[in-house]
Image: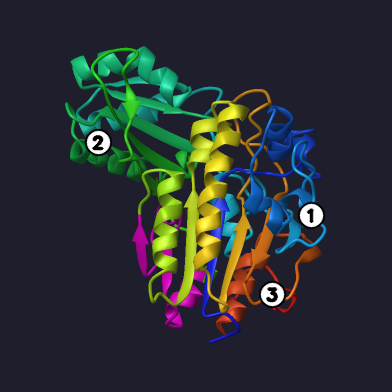
Amino acid sequence: MGKYKRIFVVVIDSMGIGAAKDAASYNDAGTNTLGHISESRDTFVIPNLQKLGLANLCKLKQVEPVAEPMGRYMVLKERSLGKDTMTGHWEMMGLHITEPFKTFTDTGFPKELIDELEERTGRKVIGNKSASGTEILEELGEEQIATGNLIVYTSSDSVLQICGHEETMGLDELYRCCEIARDITMKEDWKVGRVIARPYVGKKKGEFVRTPNRHDYAIKPYGVTALNALKDAGVKVSSVGKIADIFVNEGITESVKSKSSVHGMEQTIEIATSDFEGFCFVNLVDFDTLWGHRRNPIGYGDEIERFDVKLGELLAVLKDDDLLILTADHGNDPTYIGTDHTREDVPFIAYSPSMDKGGDIGEADTFAVIGATVTDNFGVKMPVGTIGESILDKLL
């Protein structure tokens, strides 16, 4: 075992801290998820993030930097091409993605794909366009309930999403259709990063609500990651939230799904108070799905405040030989045009009760320093072909 018996990496999904140097090539020049959230609010109460050094790392309108931050912080820059969930998380664990995943934002899915999906599921497809998940339910939810048709839609991400009413269609049937869609979209020309089951409840327009029983069917990582290396070496790898879906359970020894980001933090706190030893990898998705994509900076800021409360509870139970790392996988500036993710740098804040002091530790040109640092801590070599250098020496 290395310096730390337990490492917790918590991904605040989409909380970017400023446009990446190549943001203009993604039409994202000037974006800053966290900074613009701050500018949109009168108050921003995040005392735990503040004392760790978040305001030292990213200028915030209401939150002052602290003279002696508890955490050690740096800026992480994405080396891979893209700005989606899978690219960001895969890079954290050492993969360099050189070709972005396919998207169907402008055209919807090809007729040949839809025809095959209808034939194999035995259900007609409606929708087939880029849309907000809540808006397409308002448009087509009643028809879906009445006919049993599949609502198929996409977004600016590399996804094929299917909505089905949880009570009238049933989860098993929705999942069956999504598994068929995943098989179809393994063809190279149609290969989206994820097929997502989107169950909902409600009886009529204005009442529809998506349930927590979402399920992601992702492509397997393109190579062996830090997670595989850790698991193969006998290190326990626990995942919270959608981490297991993102990695298709590759390198995961146990996992729990979360109903919300607050619930995900509660699960992480429960793990931290157990006899768990090893690596705990957490994704908190509500920041992205509920607020970033819906372009709601006030709701996003409120979610960060709720996270900060739970962060205080997690800090209180950390042991001297624990290491906590807070980061993000991409941006999703809720003040920007459209509903897409934004190409941004992300925060890296590390804290252990055993640290004598915090402060700025520079920047890194890849998210993969995270996986490299975790494996280094546990005395495990990163797999051949991965990227990233350990910064464990900066965190001791």
Q: Earlier in the sequence, mark 2 or mark 1?
A: 1
Going from the N terminus, do you reach mark 2 or mark 3 first?
2
> Circle 2 sits in a helix, a strand or a loop, which is it?
helix
Residue 249 painted magenta: yes
State the residue position of label 2. 174
Q: In which quarter of the view is residue 166 placed?
A: top left
In-front residue for pair 152/138? 138
Q: Are marks 2 and 1 in contact (CB under 8 Å)?
A: no
Which residue is depicted at the point 40% across and 48% down? 263
Instruction: Please give left or right for residue 359 compared with residue 202 in the image.
Output: right
Residue type at the position of mark 3? Met
Mark 3 residue crowding within 10 angstroms, few (<14) / some (14–19) / many (20+): some
Which amino acid, by three-letter code, is at mark 2?
A: Leu
Name the spot of residue 387 as percent of width and height, x first.
Answer: 66, 67
Q: Say whether residue 297 is magenta.
A: no
The Cα–Cα distance between marks 2 and 3, rounded to whole angstroms, is 48 Å
Kindly identify which residue carries mark 3. 355
| Quarter of the view holding residue 66 | bottom right
- Of the two numbered discs 2 and 1 in the rendering, the one whose residue sits closer to the viewer: 1
Q: Tell which tag, 2 or 3, sits nearer the viewer.
A: 3
Residue identifier under label 1: 66
Residue type at mark 1: give it. Answer: Val
Q: Which residues are magenta?
A: 227-256
- Between marks 1 and 3 in the image, the one whose residue lies nearer the viewer: 1
Vertical placement of 287 versus 54: above or below?
above
Which residue is at a point 70% across and 28% down the rendered structure image?
42
Residue 346 shown left or right of residue 11 in the figure: right
SS type, badge 3: loop
